[in-house]
Image (tube, helix red, strand yellow):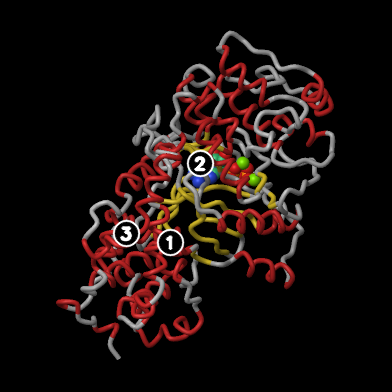
Amino acid sequence: MEIESMVANSALIKAREGGGSKGRSCKWKEMLRFPHISQCMDLAKSIERDYHSLCVKQPIGKKLFQVFCQSQPDLQNYVSLQDTLVRSSNQCIPIVQKHLQSCIQNLELDPCGDVFHDCKEELHKYLSGEPFIQYQQSMFFDRYLQWKKLERQPITKHMFRQFRLLGKGGFGEVWACQVRATGMMYACKKLEKTHVKKRRGEAMALNEKQILESLDTRFVVNLAYAYETKHALCMVLTMMSGGDLKFHIYNIGEPGLDTNRVCFYAAEVCCGLIHLHQQSILYRDLKPENILVDDKGHIRISDLGLAVRLSKGSLVRGRVGTLGYMAPEVISNGRYGMSADWWGLGCLIYEMTAGQPPFRARGEHPKPSEMERRIQTELEEYSNKFNKVVKGLCSLLLTKDPKERLGCQGSKGKEVQSHPFFKKINFRMLEAGLVDPPFKPDPRQVYCSDVQDIDEFSTVKGVTLDRVDSGFYTKFNTGSNPITWQNEIIDTGCFRELNVFGPAGTRSPDLDW
Ligand code: ADP
Ligand code: MG
Ligand code: MG
């Protein structure tokens, strides 16, 4: 390894270790200083007063509403009920009693389900009434507005430290970065403005950003910030320290992964696809380099540039994706729906198991027309690396006719999860993030090619950026993504350290007029 690469890697490893409070700039408190409450009045007027969004969905909002309830003697019990819904106190008994019957019923119907669903609903119904009104007149809501104001600060590149290059894609590069104020590590996907313009990638870039910001699941990378620099559009995403699956399949030991890992990754990808499909999003770009591994060994789907939102039950046309992984119905340029992703999952499981993709031998580069022919007419071959069960699953997913394919029979992917290959997986636990991954990346290793082996990005000449382009950049440049930003503030400990009020529950000076 060259010295340049070693230096870049050790800087990244060190930053990752110190991630959190150690990685904060010495000026972090200034960067996150609350604006005076008088400066938050525009926000107070404009934000939507929606209980669910303010007090349930947004992590900082939820915390402040809880602190508020705890400060009210008559609401304290509701908070503890909400927290545990088990250690219920006398005051809450009527709610529990009222729903006891339905709890028992739920238990009988599905012992792993959300038994307390109705209880929780009732609780929210109560809290969203009078308590929510009182909350909005309290100093806790003022504090919420201050955080919200910080959240909405314009984002510039100066707010981040940049580390090594992690990968390269169609329109630009992905770099490791760290937020100076909080110490949080992220990956920044930079799209060169000139490249985007030359290759007419505007709609695609905006599409990727908008779909990412609409999602909130542990199986797809989160978008934390979207901003622009003079030369690039930047999407700041969940840092996936374990690198992509292509690296794991081909660059560590013999090509391929052991069955336990194949099963675990396939199961998590399956959950990710089901989630996307539930939101009517077709992913269309499933392949090992787009599936990323985090520091604990969980995976997330990334690269949503080709994803499309379908109107309910409708189909789409378009020969997009990466040829080797395109489904027959995509190649034949007809209309298709979610079936294309289940084919993609078949390709992924095949490649993780075999250490090579289906329809193409290692090192072989058939002409596109030949690849198309093979995908549409040839049966894939299975080496002795495939046991009976995984072979069974692959051949069901790689069924040429989408109507016959596993995953496409109307149960929205549940039938894939029920395949014997996944019999060891408890999907409910998996969805809650409670299953231990079979492989944990080494925190001292950097799971990507050496810096100098990732090609330089060529510069585009003869493209000038104009007013029309700025209009599009403005749409892209929306700054922090609320839920991800609030989680960053909480997870790095900044919330705990900064969210202090005056002594004994009095207002702090920045909340006083
Ligand atoms: P493109 O749309 O151009 O294919 P990707 O989003 O797939 O770009 O990123 C290219 C490569 O960069 C990926 O294959 C992966 O190796 C790396 N990469 C992308 N996002 C991340 C991330 N969040 N964390 C770590 N590495 C990443
Ligand atoms: Mg990609
Ligand atoms: Mg892409």
Q: Give the mark nearest the N terminus, 2 or 1.
A: 2
Residues at marks 1 and 3, CA–CA distance in whole angstroms:
24 Å
Q: Quadrant of residue 13?
A: top left
Quadrant where the C terminus sits is: bottom left
Residue located farthest toward the top when viewing the structure as drawn: 384
Q: Give the mark nearest the N terminus, 3 or 2.
A: 3
Residue located farthest toward the left when viewing the structure as drawn: 504
Circle on res. 485: 1
Pick whichever, 154 or 280, lies toward us.
280
Q: Name the kind of residue labelled 1 in the image.
A: Trp
Residues at marks 2 and 1, CA–CA distance in whole angstroms:
19 Å
At 55% from the left and 31% from the top, the residue drawn is 417
Q: Identify the residue position indicated by label 3 in the image.
A: 82
Mark 1 residue CB less than 8 A from any atom of ligand 1:
no
- The residue tagged with tag 1: helix, strand or loop? helix
Circle on res. 300: 2
